[in-house]
Amino acid sequence: MPETVKKKYLTAKFLSCMIAKVTVMNKILEQALLYDFYGELLTPHQKEVYEQFILDDLSLSEIAESAGISRQGVHDLIRRCQKALEGYEEKLHLVERFLSVKEKVREIDGILDEWEQREQDPEAIRKKLREISDGIIQEL
C-alpha cells in the first residue's frame, strides 16, 4: 500500500513539475515571438538587453555586468520591454494572426495528405481548401 501512495505522489509531483516547465517554455516562446514581430520598435539598448535575456539566456547579473547597470535596472528594463511588446500585440494582433494562419496551413497540409492517401472526391477537397483559404484572407 505505501508503495502505491508513493507512486501516485511521485507521479503527481512529476506532472506538476513538468507542467511548470512547459508553462515557462511557453512564456519564453511567446516572448521570443513577440520580439520577432515587434523587436524593431524597441530602442537599440532595449533590444540588446532583451536579446541577451530572452535569446541568449543570460542571467540578470551577467547582463548587468556587461551593460554596466544594476541587476534591478536590468530587471526593470526587461519588464518594460515585455510590457511594450505585449502592448503592441494587444493593438496589432500580428502574432495572433500569424499563428492562426500557420494553423490553417497545417489544416491544408492535413487535408492534402488525407486526399493523397485515400484519393477522396476532388470536389469535397476543393470545398474544404476554399473554406480555409477564405478564412486566411479574412484574417489578413
Image: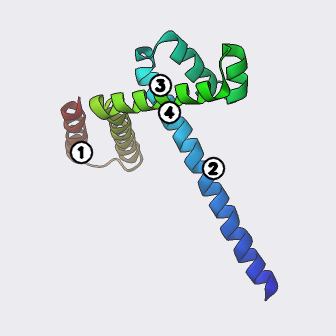
Q: Earlier in the sequence, mark 2 or mark 4?
A: 2
Image-quadrant location for residue 99: top left
Amino acid marked by disc 2: Lys
As drawn, the label of residue 31 is: 4
| Number of residues whose C-alpha sits closer than 10 Å to that of mark 2, classed few (under 14), some (14–19) or many (20 or more) | few
Foreground mark, 3 or 1?
Answer: 3
| Vertical comparison of 36 with 123: above or below | above
The x and y percentages for residue 6 are: 77, 77
Q: Earlier in the sequence, mark 1 or mark 2?
A: 2
| Number of residues whose C-alpha sits closer than 10 Å to that of mark 1, classed few (under 14), some (14–19) or many (20 or more) | some
Amino acid marked by disc 3: Tyr
Q: Earlier in the sequence, mark 3 or mark 1?
A: 3
Q: CA distance from mark 1 to mark 2?
A: 37 Å
Classify mark 3: helix, strand or loop. helix
Query: Residue at point 39% right, 40% down?
Result: 106
Foreground mark, 4 or 1?
Answer: 4
Query: Residue at point 46% right, 23% down?
Result: 36
Q: Residue 108 versus residue 126: which sits nearer the camera?
A: 108
Check contact, mark 4 vs mark 3: CB within 8 A.
Answer: yes
| Number of residues whose C-alpha sits closer than 10 Å to that of mark 4, classed few (under 14), some (14–19) or many (20 or more) | some
The x and y percentages for residue 14 are: 70, 63
Residue hosting label 1: 128
Residue hosting label 3: 35
The x and y percentages for residue 65 are: 73, 18
Q: Residue 4 versus residue 43: which sits nearer the camera?
A: 43
Amino acid marked by disc 4: Gln
Image-quadrant location for residue 134: top left
Residue hosting label 2: 21
Q: CA distance from mark 4 to mark 3?
A: 6 Å
Image-quadrant location for residue 25: top right
Q: Kindly tell me whether residue 117 is visible in this rendering.
A: yes
